[in-house]
Amino acid sequence: MGTGRLTGRRDQEATVPEASTAAGSAGGSPAGSSPRSLAEALRARDDAALAALLRARPDLLGPVPGDVTQLATRAGTRASVVRALDRLDRFALQTAEALAVGPDPCPYAVLEGLLTGGEDERARAALPDALATLRDQALVWGDEDRLRLVRTARELLAPSASRPSPTGLGPTVAEATAGMSPTRVQEIVAAVGLPATHDPVSAVTALTALFTDPERMSALLDEAPAEAHQVLGRLVWGPPYGEVTPNPTPPVRWLRDRGLLLPATARTVVLPREVALHLRGGLAHRDTAPVAPPVPAHREHRPQLVDANAAGQALAALATVEELVKSWEHTGPPVLRAGGLSVRDLKRTAAALDTTEQQAAFWAELAYATGLLASDGEADERYAPTPAFDDWLELPPAERWSQLAAAWLPATRTAPLVGEQDAKGRTLSALGPELDRSAAPEVRRRVLELLGELPEGASPDPQTLLARLAWERPVRGASELRARLAHWALAEAEVLGVTGRGALSGPGRALLEHRDPAPLLAPLLPEPVDHVLLQADLTAVAPGPLLRPLGDTLAVLADVESKGGATVYRFTPGSVRRALDAGHAAADLHAFLKEHSRTPVPQPLAYLIDDVARRHGHLRVGAASSYLRCDDDAMLGEILADKRSAGLGLRRLAPTVLAAQADPTVLLEGLRAMGYAPAAESRTGDVLVARADAHRTPARSAPVPVPEGPPVPDRTLLAAAVRAIRAGDAAATAVRKEPATSSAAGTGVPGELPRTSAAETLATVQAAALTGSAVWIGYVNAEGAASQRVIAPVRVEGGFVTGYDHTADEVRTYALHRITGVAELADDQV
């Protein structure tokens, strides 16, 4: 259990033993013997178990290991082990933590005692599954009487002064006394009534034996003062360190003199691990969590009510996304130099959508993830709709929602982070960089899966759902991020319509099951209507979603005043002028309203249209720098005399023409702000019509989610990888003849490439080609990856050797200068 047991094991876990083993169960061993290394344990697995390991830890496939030894070595690297530990559930991680503080190797009975104390039946029942998980992940190997945690995992999980263990245990007696003087160690041995020894190693061994003997340890603690038991009680469950003064109290001195507290620094003492385990009754953890916390139903709703509520949210989501993207059609917000939206533009977008900035960021990110908007890539870079937006608008509502939901579920961009700061103190902006969180899709899907496990119409208490997620991924930091992602996923699913009243909807369940949700959503959405109700207060009420031509025209002619089940539009001089700018004549507007209104056109609305139309186009703005012309010279004189026109730089060129220093767009806006209704004209003098679809970006693809680590391999890749590993292992462990010369000898280390000179390599492969025999070669490809292969050469010419590769089971050609060495196989080999 001391440090000495951990030394000298760097090569043991990956070293291939002299004798290969037969295929067996994961972590098993041949003929009842315990595997002597992790590589031997992996070699004993069958192909299905090896594929399961590669599926659970896909980082081991980059690149495909050349043989089992390489696989075992890679499985023990720090980065790979950290990734594997991060994906353990709480009890599997507690099992690994118990192994890290237990003896090495650890018998199953000892591990069971560390986790159950002999009393926790739930932990005892769950331990085999937890241990199987660790075996499957190649974090534990060995038989039940010699369980071994891989060296890197032990280093990560074992307690140290700089990295406390979740178990709350401290260092062992051997570790805590490593820097202590031999005289002090002998003083402690004498204080506890043990005979003196000739060296500090045997003294520490005797002290460890005392602290691990329940009877002698109980007798020693019976002599301790009551205050000493209080001191031990404060340290027993961790942290095991405590500060002491230069002149400690008698209880602390009593404990320190007998080694029950050992010095960690000049001002701190530590409770040795053996003492803490005795006081705990042998438990490595105060509380274990062998069973996942349940996620029960908190509220019950009728499934029809849930679906109806979700459909309403889906309809609102479609309207919001459409309104957002259309609002950026003419002059979208500029792209910041570092990327993303400015705070001011986000506030404007939120005001236009009548929502919060956080919600506006979510809708903008959703439209971006769906590929409906992007930056236009021009010198004055701005955000604008993409051509895909026009195609999206032509789809039925249910299919449009399906595209939004399908983009939301796997997205790694996380809108709620907008406004927070990155590691360098920079504020994160909507549509900007640094918003990707690779864990977001997995958490989002897991939240929906937990909702899907409840009865239809049932919703959970969010706290129980968060507790379940924390159990499934308990690693600190990752667990906190997952909790935030889960909270955001619940809110986003509700506002998008994937859930209704906190319960998974029918379309949401189809989305989770990789089915098209559109057929389920379509019957829940109201049919579009072809009419509005005009009212005398210059408003129009749409009693439902409007048909697209009607909705598009009305959106130009009027402004949206309120949303909901019925949308209210308001007619204003500005909105009517907007319709006239778009090319509609006054007569067209009267006919349009008369055709689509179920109520008579109110007289005030008719007067408003005629009044704006009478003044519209009376003034004409064109491009010189810019100019203003009007047949009524008195009106031009009125504009010149108005103080509000001073900033436009106007001067009279002719009785009916004014020149301006401002460009036509600024001149148009300035005159409209003064209450006039000018119209823009072309170089030929024709009125310019402002069309709604004037600006689109070039074709843009939706952003690709940033995956969390390497992708999970499919069955084809797994099968090919297992075959390659088995073939490479066969080549690495093939029995070879002794080299004829010392220069042709390898190192003798299993898995090491052979080394021969170029002349010896050429002579050996030429002889093999003549005799038709097979040879064993080491080869380094163009990428620098080394491998061992068994080949039967058939032709050697031009600096290349061509032959049947028994490892790859095909004919291949190898460059002679890339062969590190060659050796003949034993007579009984391939």
Image (spheres, grey):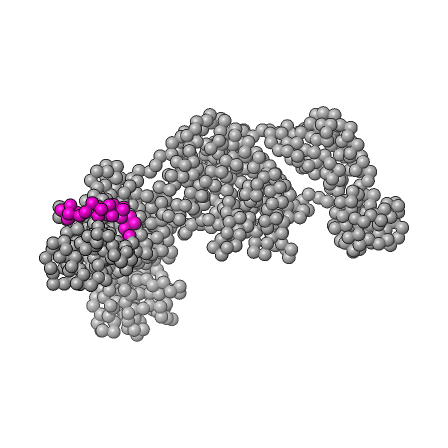
As for residue 812 lying within the magenta part, the answer is no
Using the image as rendered, state which of residue 304 and residue 165 is in the foreground: 165
Which corner quadrant holds the C terminus?
bottom left
Which corner quadrant holds the N terminus?
bottom left
Using the image as rendered, state which of residue 583 and residue 329 is in the foreground: 329
Start-end of magenta stretch? 217-242
As for residue 221 lying within the magenta part, the answer is yes
584 to the left or right of 753? right
Vertical placement of residue 591 versus 648, above or below: above
The secondary structure that most of the magenta stretch takes on is helix
Which image quadrant is residue 133 in? top left
Residue drawn 56% across the image and 56% down it? 338
- Could one spot residue 596 in this view of the protein? no
Residue 796 position in % (x across, y down): 34, 69
Residue 740 position in % (x across, y down): 21, 72
Residue drawn 69% across the image and 27% down it? 533
370 to the left or right of 632? left
Residue 519 position in % (x across, y down): 51, 32
- Could one spot residue 212 in this view of the protein? yes
Vertical placement of residue 218 versus 560, above or below: below
Using the image as rendered, state which of residue 364 and residue 635 is in the foreground: 635
Residue drawn 31% across the image and 52% down it? 164
